[in-house]
Structures are given as C-alpha cells and as structure tokens.
Image (tube, rainbow, N blue to C red):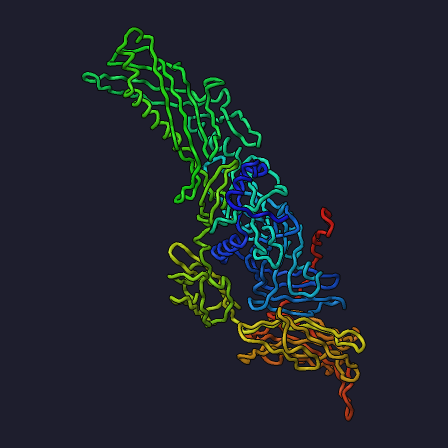
Amino acid sequence: MPAKRVTQREYLNWMALSPRTNKWSAFVAYDRDKCNQLLMQEYIEKFDNDSYLPPIDEPYATGETTWHWQLDYVTDVPRLSFENNSNDDTSAEVNMSMAVVGGTQVYLNDAGGTPEVTMISSFDPLDHPELQANRVALKDVKGEVNGAGSVTLDLGDPDVQKYIWEVSGSRIEHERRVAGAFFKRKFREAEPKRRSFKLGTLAYTEQEFLKPAVFKIRTVMEEGAQNISAANFGSGAVELRIAMKDELEGGLPGADWLYPIPNDMPGINSSLMFSHEQLMLNIIGQGTALAFGASEPRFDTVKNVEGFVEVIKVKSGTSGYFRLPPQEHVIPIGEGVRISLGEIRIPIYIDEDERLTVSHVGNGRFRVGMGSSIPSHPVDCTIDGRALNAKVSLALNADCAFTVDLEQRKIVYELQDLKAPMLLSSPDIEGQEWLYRLLLLSEFTRLVKEEARKTAESFFGHLQSIDAFVLNSLLFNSTDAVQLKSVDTPGDLVSFGSISPRLTTFAISPMEHLMGYGESYSFTVNPAQSSITWSVANLDGSSAGAGTIDASGRYTAPGLSEIPGTYKRVKVTATSGEHVSRALVTVAARAITLNPLVQTCPASTEGSPVQTRKLTANALSGGLRWSVKGDGSVPPEASPDRSNVYSAPLRQEVGTIKKTFTIDEVIVTNTGTSQTQNSLVVVTHGKQTVAMEVVMVGDKAQFSATSNGQDLPPGTEKWGCIPATGAGSIDQQGLYTPDPNSQYQFVIITIKGEIDIPERDPYFLGDAFYIQPLPLIALPPKPQPEEPQGFFEETPGEFQL
C-alpha cells in the first residue's frame, strides 16, 4: 500500500504517538531515484577488471536434443537498481541485470544422432543478450555483515536464486529461462568476490550499540505515485530496517505507515531513526554508565502509555563511580586558609532512591542524575594542616540533547546544563563557628563545584556519538553518503539528511555511453555548473590509451590499435569543487554487429505458416537498411528493439534443384556510411542423404562423407567451404585447413556427390553441409540438463517447482 507523505511537523507528531521502528534498532530510508543515482556512481567508481566473472567456456542443455555452447563468454558486472511495487506494501523489488559483452554462442542439435551446429552468434557491446532478474522481491533476503565487514547480496545464494532469471535474446521463453538457470549455476560455482554484489563495506566502529548484523530491505511508494498521470508518478523510497549484533529481527509497519521523507524540506531525501529503547538503554544509559567505569551495567525501565522508555535506573549490583580527584583550595581569609580534600568517590548505585537515572524530559532533552543529597561519604579533609572527620554529599544533574555535527557528519550528545550540588559536614566543627562558616563559604563551595563540573564534563564528553555512516554504509561506500541536516527525538530519534551532495549534486549526461574508436563525443553535466574539471582513465586508473578529454568535456576515444579485442572501457570524471560525477564509456571496435552470424532454417511450405528466424543488428551511428541476397525476404526496417525477422522461401523439390539446401545472405547496410555486415541462412529443402563426420588432426580437420552408411564412390565427392576466401580451404580428400589470419568465426563445409554421365546431366547422389565454429575446435558432448527454476504462481503464498 502506498504511504502518505506529510510535512515535517506532521511527521514528528506522528512519531510521538508510538514507537515507529517496529522493534528494529535502527531504520534508514532513501529517495529511490537518488539512491539509484548514487548506486550507479559507486558502481562506476568501483568498476574494475576484477569485477567480472571469469570467461565462460562451457555448454548447457536446452532440451532433449539441443544445447548451447558458450565460447569465451565475457559478462559485465552485475548491477542493481531498486523499483517500487504499488500492489504490495511488504516487499522490496530490485532489478538485477548483467550484460554479456563478449564471446561466441554456438547452438547444437543431435536429433539425427550426430551433433550439428544450427546457429552461431558473436556478441560485443553493440549487440548482446542480457541476464535479467527483474522484480526480485527482497522481503525475505537478508544482507549480512561478514567477518571482513562487507555487506553483500550473494547472487549464488539459494534464497536469492529462488526467483526467475532469464537471458534476453530468444523468442522462446523456455530457452531464456534455461539460460537463466545456467547463470544461476555459474554464480553458485563462482568464487564469492565475483558472485556477490557488494552493497557497501561496513564502517568500523568500537561502539557495541552500533554493530549492524542483519538488515531487511523494502521499497515504499509515495501515495498517488502509482497513477501514470500524477506529477509524482513512480516516486518511492528504499527502506532498510537494521538489527544490531546479537539482536532479534523486528517486523514490518502497518497501514498507518507514513512516507519516510517529509514533503516540505527542500533538498532532503533521506531519513534515519534510532529506536527510543535503543537510545535510552544502549546509547545514553550504557554510555553514561560506562563513562563512570561501570562493567556491563543493567537497568530498570519505566515506559509511558505510548510505549516509549521514559526512565531508566541502574540496577543494584552495578559497579561504577564518579570520582573527583584530590584537590586543595586557598580561601582568601587573612593570609589565606588552605583546605585540602581527598578523592571524592560517589557510587552510581547508592540505594533505590539514589542511583544513576536517565529521564526523557521532552523537547529532545534527556536528564541524567546521580549521587546523594545527604553527606554520607567519608572524605579526607584538612584545614591548614588540621585533619577533620568529614563526610560529603555530591550530586550530578545534567541536561543533554542530541544535535548534528555537520563537520563530523555525526549525531552527537551535547551537554546543555550541568549542576553539581555539594555538602560537607564534620562533627569536629561543632561549636567552632569560624570553621563552620568557612566550610560554607560560597567561594569554597564554588571552587569545589567548579572542579566537579569540569570532571563531569570530561565524563559526558566521552559519551558515544551516533556515526550515521555506519548505517548508511550498508548501501553505500562513500564516506559522505548522507549529510545529516536535523535531529529530533519526539519518541524515537529521527534525523533527516541529503544523499551525498558530493556525488549527486550534478550528474554527467549520459552516465553510460557507447562509441566507436577514434570518435569524439561531448559530455555535459546536469544541472550545469560554473566550473568543471574533466578527466579520463582506464579501469585500472592509468591514462595511457584511455583517449583524451578537453576542458569543455569533449572526449576523443582511442584508436583501433589501442583496443584489445572487440571493445574497451574507460571512466570519464567531472569534478566541481568537492562534488564529482562519473560516466562509464565503452569504445567498440566494430561499426556494425549483426547476429546470428549463421543459422539454419527449414524452407516454408505452401499452405502452412512461413518459417522465420530472428536477427538483431546495431550500429554505432546512422540507420540500418536490411536486404536479402537469395530467395528469402526481410523487412527493410528493423523493429524498435533492433530486431528483424527473416522469412524463408518456399520449399523446392530436391530432384528439381539437385540440392537439399540453399544459402541466403542477409545484409544490413548503414545508410549514412554505406558500411555493411552480413549473416548467412542455410535453408533446408529436404532431408540430407549424405552424412558428414569430422576428426581434428592437429590444427586441421579431416571431414568424411557417407550415403546410407556407405562411402561415396571414388571421384564423386566435391568438397567446398563458405566463405570461399578468407576462412581457409578444403582439398578433395576432405582435409580442411583454416586460415590462421581469418577474421571469420565460422566456416560452412559442403559436400556434393555426383556421378558424371556423358552427354547427360550428372546423377545426384546427395549433398550435406557442416557448420564449423572457428577457431577450429571439436564440438562438446551434450551436457546434463540444468536444474529447473522455481516460479511463483499468481496465488499468493504458493511456491512451485
């Protein structure tokens, strides 16, 4: 259910009605869009070569007779972004995506008993599939602080993997989901640092009350934001509820929950809460008792009718003292009277009536009291060297409040008022009026109280502040992830702030950009800044080969010779004072990418649906025009998603054309540059009566052919390869030699058996083709099926396999 958004005053009044942390120790919330912006900046900031999964070279089964073979498959870094679900107020949703930015995918089929390649695709940043785990509910996902202090969502964890993952590209849902299952397995098998999405690295603290151990994430939508016509359409917040070390988890709020960011605080896009009980017992109470040397202090608590802890009192048996060190005071009477006092030692627990007590007195103020009002504690006292049998009473009454230290970015405990009433009595001064008056002199008591105040202030000065970065580090690594602006304690403590102005004050536009080698592109920042310093670097931080960028933000990519493989990635940085924004730039080595490179397709049959195949293409710039050389057809314009559909020609009788297959060439042409890229479609018109086999012989391949299990008659074999040039050659004994300098990623080996008959057409014995991936490598055996993915039915609460 969406949450109502109110003013700051209304929000504080609502907080005063009852505890709002739902039995969690702490709560933080962020505007979703700002949160995603900062996550993206941190994603780019920590993006490096170690972020990738190792290249994948492995097959996976897609059916009884089909499997896919990934060759040098290079994946991008997993990235997360938070989404809102307006239909469910108990869940968080996160989109996880990971692009396949390089490698070859081979499709195989052994329906005929022998493995054969049916399709080959080659991926790069211009055209690639993407692993997608959309709308993943996080309500049951725990982020745990591990021993090294890293807070992660482990993509190999079964709890994360119980939702559907898919890999885009195929028109068949089953294939998309089997590919998703394959990646689930690869994440399970991967080493932890490569399979885990690091949300943050928990900031170290010695404060026991501030050691997050478990948290739950959900998103909440602003009321009305589910309506597409609303001005606040899509507005939402990410909420984290946090349990500290050795604490139980809390619950989720009810229908009266308010949107966690007020609507009348410009620039405010985050909030933080500490439970009132945590505040009283673990921050103020424990902090005060520990400042007085207590060991594992325990407290009696008193709650008010709203459920807040109103008063805490240290329990009997708790050690700890307020100590006033020995001192001497000179009172200006005559030549000066010297009064010496030994150490004054007041326990924090004296009796049921006199013990360390903390009270919430309202208006964000807390009162700490301890000590005695009746002189009962012995103290060494001398007046001009004369020892007295003396007793002392000393009490402390301190008023404190929380405030924001903008420089340290912490919530600090500020001493606002301190009183230290003291009485000194001694039977030795009875009847000696001058001594009696001396001990009651305002100057003497003032001096003692001043010493007591200084000592007490030093104790209170060591009370623990609340380092908000420790909590914000659950999602962010930036030390200035959130700048706190205010703090109030209407019940639970609440602080409002701004998400990292350093990283979100402005943003480079665009944050991600794809371009060609040697090209130039002008980056901008939004909103515009008066002064920007631009720089560019490789992922490892070096600048060599990263390209150049001028003072106006115009970036020039490196040349083709400086790009290893099919692409290169660099970071562009814009800096203005202490504020910074980064963009991730991918420089491609290809101008056009068309997939698949080659595929098979049965010919269409008259009276039946047309046989089709999907292709995708993308260019760095300009439009693409599609055409076919052959009998098939393709629309001249692709769909908005860059895909197009090839339609196979009608089936021809093999006896008429004396071949079981034909080859069409799909061509895409850049209308601006006239550059072209082609893809081959092997159209099958009938069942092949010739079977081909291959054996790897060193760096060559020996092909052989049989018809009905018998070798073809000598002299009837006619071997060939497509492309005819640039992919290698095959002799008439079927020995294929690849071209070591070939840029092709496949070759089609063909065989045709014909018996020459004088003065007649040759007698057709049969033909066959064999698609061979390059570089030359033996085809893998069919693997075991992947584990099926679980899925949620529409009926809530049902989970099926």
Q: Nearer the viewer, residue 361 or 715?
A: 361
Q: Is residue 735 visible?
A: no
Task: State left or right for residue 285 relative to residue 102.
Answer: left
As drawn, the residue found furthest toward the bottom would be 759
Whether residue 744 is visible: yes
Residue 131 versus residue 217 in the image, above or below: below
Q: Position of residue 397 (x, y in %)?
A: 41, 25
Measured as percent of width and height from the top left, residue 461 is found at: 38, 33
Residue extending furthest left? 335
Q: Is residue 607 above or below residue 254?
A: below
Where in the figure is residue 728, as x and y percent of width and height? 60, 77
622 vs 492, nearest the viewer: 492
Q: Position of residue 264 (x, y in %)?
A: 50, 49
Apparent side of residue 616 relative to residue 590 in the rendered image (left or right) = right
Q: Which residue in the rendered view is the most extreme toward the top?
A: 431
479 lies left or right of 83? left
Relative to 394, is 362 on the left or the right?
Answer: right
**Residue in view at x 51 percent, y 53 percent:** 34
**Residue beneath the point at 43% across and 59% down:** 541
Occupied quadrant, residue 392: top left
Labels in figure, total: 0
The part of the image, by quadrant, that contains residue 596 is: bottom right
Between 201 and 392, the residue placed more toward the observer is 392
